[in-house]
């Protein structure tokens, strides 16, 4: 098995596509256009970085840290495999911040994937 810095090339969420700074997150909550789904709230705004970026907020909602981390991993994986590639291919430089609603903790991965795919389609059609 290959090891080293190139062993995981292609996997993970590249640093330039992440929204992690609290100021950026607060700004997106204020200026972003909100879209609601059954399990998620998405805040979307043109990216000042010129590339599509993604951030995730998963409130505790009285759940354990294990469940919270699992939900964050699922949402990041969906952003990495569904949302960001589609936005890059369309040349749509949006910042997308996803906030999990309490119902997201009980949602299946397929349900979350369908919601992220629908959000992606909406954003790609907006970029035309």
Image (tube, rainbow, N blue to C red):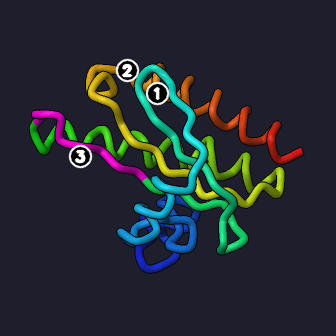
Rendered image quadrant of residue 117: top right
In the image, is 122 to the left or to the right of 3?
right
Instruction: Give me the C-alpha separation between circle 1 and circle 2.
Output: 6 Å
Q: Residues within 10 Å of mark 2 (few under 14, many from 20)?
A: few
Tell me, for residue 108, which label it has, or none. 2
Say which mark, if any, is on residue 69. 3
Mainly helix, strand or loop, the magenta region? loop
User: The magenta stretch spans which residues?
Assistant: 56-63
Give percent across and percent down for residue 47: 66, 65
Counting residues from the start of the chain, the first of labels 3 and 2 encountered is 3
The residue closer to the viewer here, 113 or 101, is: 101
Nearer to the camera, 40 or 75 = 40
User: In percent of the image, x 48 and y 55: which residue is there?
Assistant: 30
Q: Which residue is mark 1?
A: 112
Quadrant where the image shows the N terminus: bottom left
Q: Residue furthest right?
A: 128
């Amino acid at each position: 098995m290959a090891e080293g810095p190139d062993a995981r090339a292609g996997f993970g969420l590249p640093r330039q596509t992440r929204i992690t700074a609290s100021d950026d997150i607060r700004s997106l909550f204020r200026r972003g256009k909100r879209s609601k789904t059954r399990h998620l709230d998405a805040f979307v705004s043109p990216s000042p970085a010129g590339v599509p970026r993604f951030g995730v907020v998963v409130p505790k909602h009285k759940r354990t840290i294990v469940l919270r981390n699992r939900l964050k991993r699922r949402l990041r994986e969906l952003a990495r495999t569904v949302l960001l590639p589609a936005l890059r291919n369309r040349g749509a430089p949006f910042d997308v911040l996803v906030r999990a609603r309490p119902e997201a903790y009980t949602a299946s991965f397929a349900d979350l994937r369908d919601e992220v795919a629908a959000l992606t389609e909406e954003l790609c059609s907006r970029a035309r």
